[in-house]
Amino acid sequence: MKLLQETDCPVLAITGEEDVQANAADLQTMAGLGNDNIHCHIVKEMDHMLRQYTGEKSVLNVKKQYKKTNRQTYTPTARRRD
């Protein structure tokens, strides 16, 4: 975190609230470093695959979760807006 605190280049960190592969708490820590170059965003109800997910967040269920949501469109909050 010390390197991030001192960086002078732009950093954009995005994760989903339901992402079991990236810890949203890490982004909260990054945002609290006081570096204006760091921009963090946690997308509600989004998993690692950018799909909407509201079930139980569990590493043990991730394979089943990804298989179930594989054909879904991206979560509405992750879609490109023109």
Image: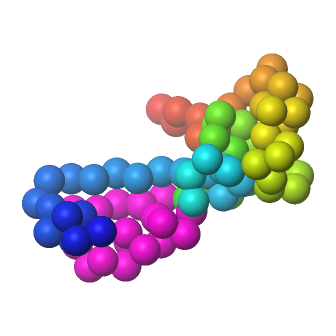
Q: Position of residue 69 (x, y in %)?
A: 82, 30
Residue 47 in sight here? yes
The magenta span reads 24-41
Residue 76 visible in the shown view: no
Please tell me in which quadrant of the rendered image residue 23 appears. Answer: bottom right
Query: Residue pushed farthest top?
Result: 71
Vertical comparison of 59 with 39: above or below:
above
Give x and y (percent) for residue 57: 80, 55
Is residue 38 magenta-colored? yes
Q: Residue placed at 27% from the left, 53% from the top?
A: 11
Farthest front residue in view? 60
- Relative placement, left or right, of 28 versus 24 is left
Q: Quadrant of residue 8?
A: bottom left
What's the residue at 20%, 64% (across, down)? 3
> Can you give x and y, in whole percent of width and height, for residue 41 in the image?
48, 58
Give the x, y percent position of residue 78: 59, 40
- The front one of 77 and 72 is 72
Q: Quadrant of residue 79?
A: top right
65 in the magenta segment: no
Quadrant location of the N terminus? bottom left
Q: Residue 79 vs residue 76: left or right?
A: left
Q: Residue at x 38, y 71 (%)?
A: 31
